[in-house]
Image: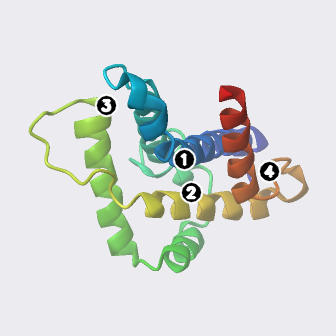
């Protein structure tokens, strides 16, 4: 049996991840036009980058080091069951996911949190894997929570609504 406070805490982090993920994607196409008149300020590009950093940090709270208080292993009782679900959703073996996880942690540690100018990295290490793994965890926990869930019915619609509200507020 799960702890409902802990479960809601994970949904809070997941929803933060999804908000930042969708806003990052939504701003990606808007930065060029919004920043074109004042390139030296790059306001929207900066907001985009801050949200991107939040995506990485939120993901690492859930999938980073096992010692993270919010790590999925501290809530999910059947680790093998979730790992199988994760492997199926991402099409990655447990070993491949671990290699990916370490790459994201390296990116977080050397670029997002502690800036190392000489760090050679991809722009975003397989961003779609972050989304797919967060969605897999969300769906897994949602199934565990049952009637106690109370969050968005559809993450894609949730994300689209977040972006629409943001863009509407800009006008």
Mark toward the viewer: 2 or 1: 1
Dividing the picture into quarters, in which one does residue 113 lie?
top left
- Residue 36 spot, x, y in % from top left: 40, 31
Outermost residue on the right side: it is 147
| Numbered tag placed on residue 152 in the rendering | 4
Q: Give the secondary structure at mark 2.
A: helix
Quarter of the picture holding the N terminus: bottom right
Q: Nearer the viewer, residue 97 or 157?
A: 157
Q: Nearer the viewer, residue 162 or 111?
A: 162
| Residue beneath disc 1 | 21
| Residue beneath disc 3 | 113
| Distance between the alpha carbons at the discs numbered 4 and 1 | 15 Å
| Distance between the alpha carbons at the discs numbered 3 and 2 | 20 Å
Q: Give the secondary structure at mark 1.
A: helix
Please give the name of the residue rendered at 34% of the width and 26% of the height, measured from the top-left corner: 39
Q: Nearer the viewer, residue 65 or 78?
A: 65
Q: Is residue 61 visible?
A: yes
Height in image: 32 above or below 1? above
* 2 and 4 marks in contact (CB < 8 Å): no
Mark toward the viewer: 4 or 1: 1
Mark toward the viewer: 1 or 3: 1
């Amino acid at each position: 049996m799960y702890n409902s406070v802990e479960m809601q805490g994970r949904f809070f982090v997941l929803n933060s991840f999804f908000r930042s993920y969708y806003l990052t994607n939504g701003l990606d196409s808007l930065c060029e036009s919004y920043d074109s008149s004042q390139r030296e300020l790059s306001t929207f590009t900066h907001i985009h980058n801050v949200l991107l950093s939040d995506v990485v940090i939120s993901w690492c709270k859930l999938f980073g080091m096992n010692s993270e208080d919010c790590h999925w292993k501290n809530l999910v009782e059947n680790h093998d069951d979730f790992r199988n679900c994760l492997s199926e959703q991402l099409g990655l073996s447990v070993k491949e996911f671990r290699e990916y996880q370490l790459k994201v942690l390296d990116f977080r540690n050397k670029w997002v949190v502690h800036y190392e100018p000489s760090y050679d990295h991809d722009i975003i290490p397989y961003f779609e894997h972050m989304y797919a793994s967060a969605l897999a965890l969300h769906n897994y926990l949602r199934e565990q929570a049952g009637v106690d869930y109370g969050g968005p019915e559809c993450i894609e619609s949730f994300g689209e609504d977040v972006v629409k509200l943001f863009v509407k507020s800009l006008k």
